[in-house]
Amino acid sequence: MTEPVLTMSHISKTFGPVRALVDVSLTVYPGETHALMGENGAGKSTLMKILSGAHSPDPGGEIFVDGKPLPTGSPQVSKEYGIAVIYQELSLAPNLTVAQNIFLGGEAARAGIVNRAEMREGAQKLLDRLGLDFRPSTLVGSLSLGERQLVEIARAMSRDAKIIVMDEPTTSLSSRETDKLFDVIAGLKAAGVAVIYISHRMDEIYRLSDRCSVLRDGSYVGTLDRKELDADRLVKMMVGRDLSSFYKKDHTPTDTARDVVLEVEGLGDGRFVRDCSFQVHRGEVLGIAGLVGSGRTELLRLIFGADPAAEGRVLLEGREVTPKSPRQALDAGIAYLTEDRKGLGLFLDMTIRDNIGMAVAERDAGGLGRQNFAKARERAKKAVEALGIRTPSVRQTVGALSGGNQQKALLARLLEVQPRVLLLDEPTRGVDVGAKSEIYRLIDRLAQEGLAIVMVSSELPEIIGIADRCLVMRDGYIAGEVTAGPGAPINQEDIMFHSTGAVGEKQKERAG
């Protein structure tokens, strides 16, 4: 059997009283994609930071690269040993060219003068090898997020990386960019590069990984070969319990005309959304599915007044409210959870207390023009308890929370305005399986309490698991509606056929 390119043995790490890693061992072979899974806080990032030299392990652990011991605690030494880490927050300089970013810190120079021609030539060879069609002279700031990620990979290859760690690389990528990234990973494997792939997305793990290792609570749980990969088995390894009730759906929606809460009539913006009409009932979870670019997010933004509508109207319990701004939507009783919680939702450097109370701070002030900190603190404490936000204090900054707890803090803020309609855009994006289960239970509870919920999701099992029915968008239109049959869930194939426009062929096949 091929000798491992990486062996991490008995790695532990303690931060004060917190044991982040406990006796973790990991073996990775050349040319394999090794998935690393676990809930947020399981220790994945800490383990990779030790590998990259950003952290030093506690005494007793050892790391070997190609059989040679790796001195820990030095990012520069780790790079020299062929280790590259590509984080979710990319470390590129947007005002520099592709070639300058690839060779940043290792510029080709003669007599102290940077040789730009040699750098461009070297960058072009790397871009050709990766099958990329942008030029070395292109400014990185003009590239898409997916293209920037590929520049990071080119940088790693320029340093002859033997091991490339990718941390949630597809979180903000389109399906086309994701496919391109996967093609590049296949090329890296063929060249003998080991890829350690961190993701919460099961479909990616099935598609890419040769083996998958799981951490839980800082400890190593086990490793599965590709043929052993199974969703139930992986989830149980990650959370330590059987998640047979992973998708919580105890609510019973009403469907009589008098219980229509939200009505959308012919809504469109003239560009991305066209002539969309539907109703949502009290206590109902309405899913919206569709391929990337189908107009799902844009539709929610129109309903919320974040973008101007060119046609149509929005009615709330029979009364037209068509909001011209998010403030008007909130005042009417419509709340919106953005898919970009870090960029558009949360104030990461502010406390949990201030984030949760942001939407009602003016009301709490009681016209005095001064923030009521006591009321805000009590409000935040109740929300933390009700939503199960894991934090030592409401004075903790939101940026220090895990992705799942950040999402629950944002939901808590929206619920403080006591909405009648809740619009959720990718509510579980970037959170681990345990937090997903908790968010599903929260959505189910809110529906039981009578909230009308509209949920956009790219994960079809999520739509099928918790939605009562599903609208499918294509090219800005509502292409069809899929409902659950008697004793049967929403059909995933029907959603995909509506999404791709092949529903006619499907109907012919069934008729035959």
Image (cartoon, helix red, strand yellow):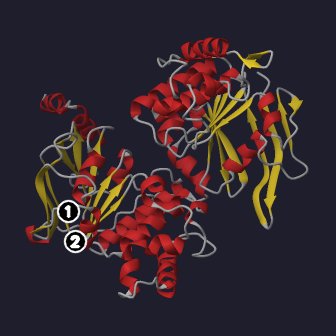
Q: Residue at x 81, y 15 (%)?
A: 111
Q: Find numbered disc 1 in the image and state the secondary structure of the residue it sits on.
A: loop
Residue 348 spot, x, y in % from top left? 54, 61
Residue 377 visible somewhere in the drawing: yes
| Image point (21%, 55%), residue name | 486
Q: Cα distance, mark 2 to mark 1?
A: 8 Å
Q: Is residue 496 above or below residue 452?
A: above
Q: Is residue 495 above or below residue 488?
A: above
Query: On the picture, is 422 further left or further right than 210?
Result: left
Residue 490 shows in the view: no
State which quadrant residue 509 falls in: top left
Residue at (62%, 11%) from the top-left corner? Answer: 121
The three-letter code of the residue at mark 1 reads Pro
| Location of mark 2 (residue) | 332
206 is higher (above) or lower (below) than 132: below
Q: Residues within 10 Å of mark 1 (few under 14, many from 20)?
A: many
Where is residue 223 shown, x and y percent of the image?
67, 41
Tell me the tag on residue 323: 1
**Is residue 446 left or right of 409 when viewed as pictured?**
left
Q: Are marks 2 and 1 in contact (CB under 8 Å)?
A: yes
Q: Check the picture and name the quadrant holding the C terminus.
A: top left
Badge 2 marks a residue whose secondary structure is: helix
Instruction: Classify 10 Å Cα crowding around label 2: few (below 14), some (14-19), many (20 and above).
Output: some
Relative horizontal placement of residue 372, taking residue 391 as reference (left or right) = left
Amino acid beneath label 2: Ala
Pick the front one: 11 or 468: 11
